[in-house]
Image (cartoon, rainbow, N blue to C red):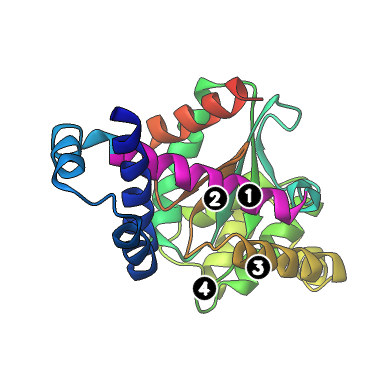
Amino acid sequence: MRDSILRAVGVFALAILGGLLGAGLFGASGLGDRQTEAFLMENPEMLQRMAQELQARDAEKRLAQAGNEWREAFPGAVLGNPKGSRTLFEFSDYNCGYCRLSKDHVETLIAQDPELRVVVKEWPIFEGSEAAARLALAAAKQGKFAAFHNALFEQESADDAALERAGTAAGLDMARARRDAQGRDVTMELMRNAMIAEELGFSGTPAWITGNTILQGAQGVDALASAVQQAEDGA
């Protein structure tokens, strides 16, 4: 009897996640009875666990289909330990308020974990952000990505004046940086990041990947640290 209920719960979870199609499947299965309803009412946490498991499997499938090429960092566009054994990918935009908030979370994570490598994937989706993303990658070519990244997030926005201030604060050769910002390698990096973000179904910035786990939105220090640890435990 318990097995039949668990099968019903599984179909019911799919119904919730799949909308009308799943609901039709649930009804057609003949499993939607009062006994199943009573079981779900007594064990509501089961649906949450099943939904989380389904989401995790979906993320793993999408990441497998995307391959591994995107996991390569643009040379120099890394925060923390460039050779660290644990990696967190961040898709970010300099005009994103939640990305600005997350900067402090990432700095805390790096301070707590000397083995953490944070690969920043510039994904300019807000109006006026492409120039900032390009200059950040140009800063990486001068070995000053972290300094520029942090300085720009200290600004209220990422407009031209803010880029100039951040570049000066980071000690960039601005003439070289503006040339490098228009380079083919920078353009290709932005294109790849946009393509992988679309392929993985990201809805906005920030978005995070560690191991086979995808997180979207500002997460906070504890959630990110937990995800990184779980990725390592599952490696």
Q: Residue at x 85, y 65 (%)?
A: 185
Give the mark nearer the N terminus: 4 vs 3: 4
Q: Are marks 3 and 1 in contact (CB under 8 Å)?
A: no
- The answer to which of 112 and 182 lies nearer the viewer is 112
| Residue type of the residue flagged with mark 4 | Asp
| Residue type of the residue flagged with mark 1 | Lys
Residue 2 vertical placement versus 58 (above, below): above
Which residue was labeled with disc 4? 159
Which residue was labeled with disc 3? 194
Crowd class of label 3 (few under 14; some 14 to 19; many from 20; radius 10 Å): some
- The answer to which of 226 and 96 lies nearer the viewer is 226
Crowd class of label 4 (few under 14; some 14 to 19; many from 20; radius 10 Å): some
Q: Is residue 110 left or right of residue 81?
A: left
Which residue was labeled with disc 1? 61
Crowd class of label 2 (few under 14; some 14 to 19; many from 20; radius 10 Å): some
**Inter-mark Cα distance, 3 to 1:** 19 Å
The quarter of the displayed image where residue 43 is located? top left
62 within the magenta span: yes
| Residue type of the residue flagged with mark 3 | Ala
Q: Quadrant of the N terminus?
A: top left
**Inter-mark Cα distance, 4 to 2:** 37 Å
SS type, badge 1? helix
Which residue was labeled with disc 2? 58
Give the mark nearer the N terminus: 3 vs 1: 1
